[in-house]
């Protein structure tokens, strides 16, 4: 039987590398490990990291934004965030000009808000429940 150990990375195709890097690196605070390009075909790539997991980002001129309500592909991915409270997290997002389209929502393991990146990819931002002794 196969036994996966961890999520290594998620790969995203994006329409505007600069807007995407601003959102993930400047607004959400992921570490920007490296960028490359433009390549011969005009594409660019970047690698962001949060904890031990990565987000690989690729842009090319033929990539278009999601325009349908329920497209095939990535539904969302979740980042565990550090904040004193969900209210503080929401205030930080509003200050950065990021709209929250859902939440806060209480789940079994924490409370989440949902935002969209510049191409409409949904990102869940979760505050884990504090463990009690």
Image (cartoon, rainbow, N blue to C red):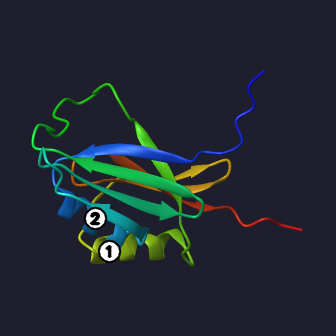
Measuring from the top left, give residue 114's x and y in whole percent. Answer: 40, 52
Q: Residue at x 35, y 70 (%)?
A: 25
Going from N to C along the chain, the mark reached first, 2 or 1, is 2
Residue under circle 1?
26
Front in this rendered view, residue 72 or 97: 72
Tell me the distance, in whole angstroms, between the alpha carbons under discs 2 and 1. 7 Å
23 left or right of 91 in image: left
Q: Quadrant of residue 126?
A: bottom right
The answer to whether residue 104 is visible is no
Residue situated in front as seen by the camera: 2 or 84:
2
Residue 51, horizontal then vertical, whole percent = 58, 64
| Whether label 2 touches label 1, CB < 8 Å | yes
Per the image, the residue denoted by label 2 is: 21
- Indicate which disc residue 4 carries: none
Residue 129 seen anywhere in this rendered image of the structure: yes
Q: Circle 2: is it few (<14), some (14-19), or many (20+) Cα within 10 Å?
A: many
The secondary structure type at the circle numbered 2 is: helix
Question: Which residue corresponds to the image point at 83% horizontal and 66% vertical from the top-left?
Answer: 132
Q: Residue furthest front?
A: 40
Percent across and percent down for residue 61 are 10, 43
């Amino acid at each position: 039987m196969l036994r996966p150990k961890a999520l290594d990375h998620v790969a995203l195709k994006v329409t505007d590398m600069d807007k995407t890097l601003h959102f993930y690196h400047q607004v959400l605070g992921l570490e920007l490990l490296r960028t490359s390009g433009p390549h011969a075909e005009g594409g660019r790539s970047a690698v962001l990291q949060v904890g031990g997991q990565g987000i690989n980002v690729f842009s090319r001129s033929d990539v278009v934004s999601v325009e349908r309500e329920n497209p095939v592909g990535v539904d969302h991915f979740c980042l565990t965030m550090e904040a004193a409270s969900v209210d503080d997290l929401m205030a930080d997002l509003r200050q950065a000009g990021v709209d929250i389209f859902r939440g806060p929502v209480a789940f079994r393991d924490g409370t989440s808000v949902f935002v969209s990146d510049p191409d409409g990819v949904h990102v869940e931002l979760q505050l884990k429940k504090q463990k009690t002794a």
